[in-house]
Amino acid sequence: MKYTRLPNTNIRISKMCLGTMTWGRQNSEAEGHEQMDYALEQGINFFDTAELYPIPPKKELYAVTEEIIGRWFKKTGNRDKVILASKIAGPAPFSKYIRTTGFRRDSIITAVEGSLERLQTDYIDLYQLHWPERATNFFGQRGYDSESHDFWEDRIHQVLETLRDLVKEGKIRHVGLSNETPWGAMRYLEESKVHQDLPRMLTIQNPYSLLNRLFEVGLSEVSMREKIGLLAYSPLAFGVLSGKYLDEIKPRKGRLTLFPHYNRYSSENSTRATQEYANLAKTHGLSLAQMALAFVNTRPFLTSNIIGATTMEQLKENINSIHTELSDEVLEGIEAIHNSIPNPAP
């Protein structure tokens, strides 16, 4: 395994992070425990979860993934071997059953304490805001709709104050963002610069893959200049970049077969780009999945690459991609395809 550090800390984390969002829906508890056992054996010490998980969210399955992880910690005693990240759900139609109060002080405290109880731990290493409270361009919306202004109250200072107090209490160690924009990232960073008693956002968990490199527009500069590291999610684009959906017969248990409304990476342009990337990988004796993951691993703004799998075979291939080195010819081929079909998925 290769390792990086959480920016501005001495915390050593694996460059590949174990994603958990399928546990409790596509994966059983036993399968989730098997994945954690194997990942830890392979040197992965960074796990990411959220109170929203499993995905797709469902009221009856609220926070089941955290419970699965908590029971593994209790069973194995491995809490001290894992750098653990979780998230608070923001306001959205699909999360109304969790809460409708956004990131108010009492909401954040309730969310953290609930996660701690389910995870059977005294602290969370990295606590993230899963998406902004305000209406902006996230979750597949490419551009900002200037007419979508909501009645959002700018309480970023108060949010950071609450997180600071939770850090002081030892319930969380560090904080990060997710599904944020350049404006939002800078707004949080500037607030903690002006008020130095407030915690600094260390990471931003956003989508990044061969089909969606929008992080490079604006956020990559913020990331590198401000030292806020990318935790890349969906590096295989819901499994599309494994190539398994290119065949006419779709995999019976594939994520997009089970949940076809998750079609963010299934447009005509995305399919065309995926086929071209598959051809490039084949030409150079690589699997598409390993080429796609290895590309993400080369990015200078990357802190960790979040991989998820529903089978052990997938997990093993994904983890092994850390050893895949891409030649200049492969990287040039990737850029040629990207220039021809840039960011086909928002």
Image (cartoon, grey):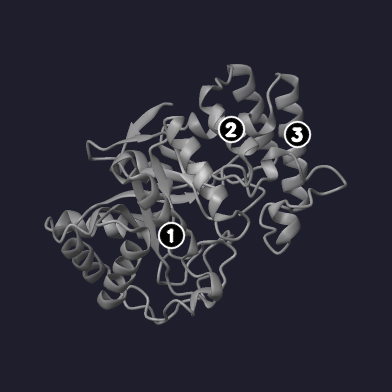
Inspect this view and state whether residue 216 appears.
no
Q: In this view, does 6 lie to the left or right of 150?
A: left
Query: Given this view, does label 3 or label 2 mark the residue nearer the observer?
Result: 2
Label 2: which secondary element: helix
Graded by Cα atoms within 10 Å as few (under 14), some (14 to 19) or many (20 or more), the crowding at tag 1 reads many
Q: Nearer the viewer, residue 10 or 299?
A: 10
Relative height, residue 197 to residue 105 (above, below): above
Q: What element carries label 3?
A: helix
Q: Where is residue 273 in the image (x, y as percent from the top left)?
A: 73, 40
Q: SS at mark 1? A: helix
- Position of residue 239 relative to residue 100, above or below, is above
- In the shown orientation, is residue 213 left or right of residue 280? left
Q: Which amino acid does label 1 sit on?
A: Glu
Q: Residue 211 location, x and y as percent?
A: 63, 44
Which dot marks residue 66? 1
Q: In this view, does 267 lie above or below 6?
A: below
Rendered residue at 66%/25% (across/down): 333
| Residue labelled with disc 2 | 316
Residues 217 and 230: in front is 230
**Of marks 3 and 2, which one's residue comes earlier in the chain?**
3
> Quick one: label 1 or label 3, which is nearer the N terminus?
1
Residue occupied by mark 3 = 276
Percent across and percent down for residue 18 are 47, 43
Residue at the left extreme, as displayed? 197
